[in-house]
Image (cartoon, rainbow, N blue to C red):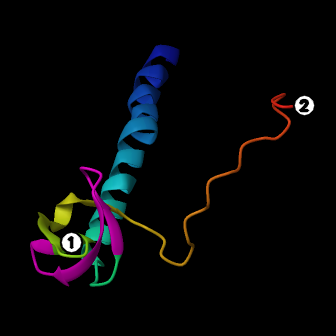
Amino acid sequence: MGSLLLLLLIPLAMWFLVLRPQQARLRAQRDLVATLEAGDRVVTAGGIVGTLTVVGDTEVTLVTTPGVELQVLRGAVSRRLDTSAPPAPPEPPDAADGEGT
């Protein structure tokens, strides 16, 4: 009886540990791609950062620098960057590192 219960619990555990998180990631990616709008700052799967200017049904136009426009598939957008928070400035070097004093 115990081994039968174990055989039933292993697939259930695999579903919770592997399949369920993967389904959640796919759902989040689908929702992201469906809600893309012009003006969004995004990162593509290849690591290219830019701002969307034209959002079509299957493709988007991404401006990386002034005068450089790339057309990529909507599915290639991997995440949206938070535009409300400016990038953090680099930290100054630590003065207590033993140099000079």
Question: Which quarter of the rendered picture does the C terminus lie within?
Answer: top right
Amino acid on which disc 1 is placed: Leu
Above or below, 4 relative to 60? above
From the viewer's perspective, tell me whether residue 24 is left or right of residue 72: right
- Number of the label disc, if any, that sits on residue 46: none
**Helix, strand or loop under label 1:** strand
Badge 1, how many Cα within 10 Å: few under 14, some, many 20+? many
Task: Please state if 73 lies on the left or on the right of 33 as rendered.
Answer: left
Which region is colored magenta?
A: 41-60
Mark 2: secondary structure: loop
Q: Earlier in the sequence, mark 2 or mark 1?
A: 1
**Location of mark 2 (residue):** 101
Q: Give the residue drawn at x 19%, y 62%.
A: 75
Horizontal and vertical percent position of residue 27: 33, 61
- Give how far across and how far down residue 51 sits, in percent: 30, 74
Which residue occupies 12% across, 64% down? 73
